[in-house]
Image (cartoon, rainbow, N blue to C red):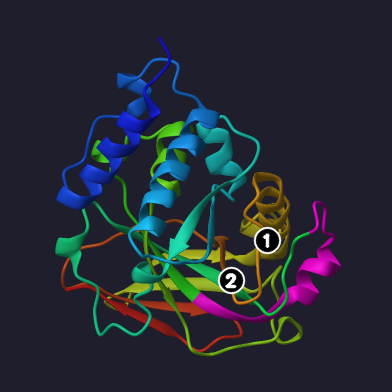
Amino acid sequence: MPPDLEMIAAALADARRNRIAIPPITETSPGFDVASAYAVQEINTRKRLAAGERIVGRKIGLTSPAVQTQLGVDEPDYGMLFDRDDVSDAASVAVAELMQPKIEAEIAFVLDKPLKSANPGIEEVASAIGYAVAAAEIVDSAIADWRIKLADTVADNASGAKFVLGKDRRKLSEIDLHLGGMEMCLNGKQVSVGVGAACLGNPLNAARWLARKMAEVGRPLDAGDIILSGALGPMANVAAGHEFAVHVQGFKPLHVVFA
C-alpha cells in the first residue's frame, strides 16, 4: 500500500505548529521516496498559500558534495521561502518558536528579471540577478533528532525555517563568488568557516540548478524572488542567548541574535 501523502503532510504541518518532532517518515512509511517527498512539500506549500502566506523565493539545500555523498544523492534539493519566515528586520529570533534549530551562512541572490527558460546558461542566470547579500538561514527539522534521509528533509520543506538577509547589497562584479571566504562566529568564537567554492563550486551553479528545476516543476523564478544559494560552511547549533556574526568576504558583517 503506497504512503498516504495527505496524512504525512498533515503530520509534518502539525509537528511544526505544535513544535513536537515526529519519527523519520522514511522509517514509518515504507516506500516513501523523493518523488513522494516533493509531493508532500507541494501539499503543504499549497495549504500555506491558501492560508494567505506568500512565496518570496526558494532555498537550495545539499549543495556540499560531502553532504550529498553522506545522503547518497547527486544533486541538491529545494524548498520554498515564505514571507512570514523572513526575520531580517527582527531584533532577535525566538528560539521558542523553533524545535531544534541550526544556523548556516550563505550568499543570497535577489532577481530583477524572471528566469523562466528550461535550460538557462550561467550568463543568463547572472544577468537576472539584481544584487547579492550575505545571508543566514535558520534551519530546523520536524524530524526527531535530525535523523533525516533525503526524502525526510525534502518533505519538510528542505528543513527550512527562518532566514535573515543582510542590508549590504553588492553587484556580482563586486564580489568573488568562487574564492570569497566566510567565517561565522558565536559570541566571538569561530564556529564555521568556508568558501564560495563549497557551494557546488560556485553559488551561481546552485542558482542555475534551481532555475532549471523550478522551470521543470512549473514554479519558475520571477523578478523579486530571493534565492538562498546554499551553505558556505558547516551549520552551528542555536540556543537562546546566542549571537552570531556572519562574515562573508565582500560584505559588511551580518548579526543574528537568538532569544
Asked which quadrant contains residue 112, the reply is bottom right
Please, is residue 22 above or below residue 255 in the view?
above
Q: Residues within 10 Å of mark 1 (few under 14, many from 20)?
A: many
Q: Magenta span covers which residues?
A: 117-134
Outermost residue toward the top? 1
Q: Is residue 173 left or right of residue 227?
A: right
Left or right: 221 in relation to 156: right
Task: Specify the farthest residue to the front.
Answer: 50
Alpha-carbon neighbours of circle 2 within 10 Å: few (<14), some, or many (≥20)? many
Task: Give coordinates of residue 165: x percent, y percent.
Answer: 46, 78
In three-dimensional space, the C-alpha distance between marks 2 and 1, rounded to whole angstroms, equals 12 Å
Magenta-colored stretch includes residue 123: yes
Q: Nearer the viewer, mark 2 or mark 1?
A: 2
Residue in front for this viewpoint, 231 or 189 = 231
The correct choice, above or below, for 208 with respect to 56 in the image is: above
Q: Amino acid at mark 2?
A: Asp
**115 left or right of 16 in image:** right
Q: What number is the disc on residue 225?
A: 2
Q: Quadrant of residue 127?
A: bottom right
Residue 128 picture location, percent across and down: 75, 74
Which label number is shown at residue 207? 1
User: Is residue 194 located in the magenta-colored stretch of the structure?
Assistant: no
- Residue 143 appearing in the image: no
* Local SS, label 2: loop
Please state the horizontal and vertical placement of residue 149, each as a whole percent of the image: 43, 32
| Quadrant in which the C terminus appears | bottom left
